[in-house]
Image (tube, rainbow, N blue to C red):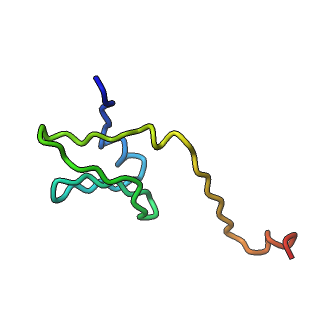
Amino acid sequence: MKNNILSLVQFLEKGFEVQMKDKNLKIFDESGAAITSVKMTRNKMFPMDLSIYLSKCLKAEISNMMNLWHLQ
């Protein structure tokens, strides 16, 4: 088998939004940013090349601006 089978329910349980429209599958993260868009093939599959997702991007957020005192 060339592709892994992804569970849409697992995406939903983790807070992602899954949209299937016009023969496209789109997955959005909890902030609403699109993380992937895949076109449906002739055999009604949505093949996703996961090798492009091997690297990680980390995001840092600060909720209290007072924690930035050391940057001034």
Against 14, residue 68 (above or below) is below
| Identity of the residue drawn at 27% across and 39% down | 47
Query: In the visual, does 61 lie left or right of 13?
Result: right
Against 7, residue 13 (above or below) is below
Query: In the visual, does 20 lie left or right of 16?
Result: left
| Identity of the residue drawn at 30% across and 43% down | 8
| Identity of the residue drawn at 87% across and 69% down | 70
Question: What percent of the width, then of the height, locates residue 22?
Answer: 15, 59
The quadrant of the image that shows the N terminus is top left
Question: What percent of the width, then of the height, locates residue 20?
Answer: 21, 54
Depth check: 24 or 20 in front? 24
| Identity of the residue drawn at 58% across and 51% down | 57
- Residue 33 in which image quadrant: bottom left
Question: What percent of the width, then of the height, locates residue 6?
Answer: 32, 36
The quadrant of the image that shows the C terminus is bottom right
The total of numbered circles placed on residues is 0
Depth check: 16 or 23 in front? 23
